[in-house]
Amino acid sequence: MSLELSVVVPLYNEEESVRPLYEAIVQGVEPLGVSFEIVLVDDGSRDGTVRIADEIARADPRVCLVKFRRNYGQTPAMAAGIAEARGEIIVTMDGDLQNDPADIGELLARIEEGNDIVVGWRHERQDKLLTRKVPSRIANALIAKVTGVPIRDNGCSLKAYRACLIKQIPLYSEMHRFIPAMASIAGPRIAEIRVRHHARRFGRSKYGLSRIYKVLLDLMVIKTVASFTARPMLWFGMLSLPMLAIAVLALGWTCFTLTAQGTMSLSIAGTGVIFLTSTVMLLAAGAIGELIYKLGDLREHQFSSLTQHLLVRGAASHD
């Protein structure tokens, strides 16, 4: 019998929160009447988090514990939990008790409506204004503008995904907050719902302003991947235009001085040759990318046609 739901929870120095969190998840999910598992991922905690989580996993067969030898960060921990999860639907959440497991039922209901990703929106966020709320609002507005995916709260870890989709998305650095944007390439149906948010009860926050530069770098990567995927020749061509302009100016000046004065500057001529070569290399890379993309589309179309042919033939044989 396949599992219907996996709840993935990364943990880092949350010894006081682990047991109340486990109990809250069980209380929130059991009334839904679905088969489920809880995947706890210890991200190299230095306190008693592993010990308590291990005790819970030994006492409840529905709990799976993944241990990291050292701290890798929230995204690698979440990726490990997603890879280990066996449920058809995967729900992710933080391990600090700020997300409410009672909202999982609403997430599943929206998935059942036909959505592929359901994102939680902390409409009454219980965090500090200057260090958490303001940077988050600026980041969400920037992410929506750059990626074209209008998510109000990308930083909320409480999300639900179809496993067949989320397991195909590579996660690293701080990419967990960009999953809807990364998945948008495949054209999924994305919904957003209001979820509860509680003030931190134990320990201290692991987030801060120091993560801003990582988020900005990851945002650049997402924009590059999303833009270059479908039209590589166009984007490589646009990147080559400044180099082509510099090459034309440098080589034009070289030809002019050589004709008018009989001399030329080797540095200017060399610069023109270098930039012209770079332009050709970029255009060649774009052409190769375009070829790879078209071949991928062709193979997918051929596979789809073959599958449909086999299904039709199988149906005819059965009749």
Image: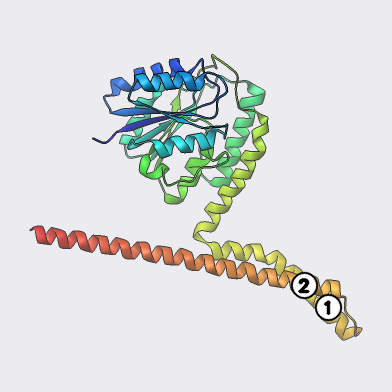
Nearer to us in this view, 67 or 252: 67
**Could you tell me if the residues under marks 2 and 1 are in contact, i.e. CB atoms within 8 Å?**
yes
Residue type (three-letter) at the residue carrying disc 2: Gly
Q: Residue at x 46, y 18 (%)?
A: 52
Q: Which of the two discs, 2 and 1, labels the residue nearer the N terminus?
A: 1
Q: Residue at x 37, y 40 (%)?
A: 163
Q: Is residue 7 above or below residue 162?
A: above
Look at mark 1 in the image and give the residue it sits on.
254
Residue 305 x %, y %: 28, 64
Residue type (three-letter) at the residue carrying disc 1: Thr
Query: Picture quarter containing residue 36?
Result: top left
Q: Quadrant of the N terminus?
A: top left
Whether residue 98 is visible, yes or no, is no
Q: Is residue 262 above or below residue 92?
A: below
Nearer to us in this view, 103 or 285: 285
Q: Quadrant of the C terminus?
A: bottom left
- The mark found on residue 272 in the picture is 2
Residue 295 x %, y %: 43, 67
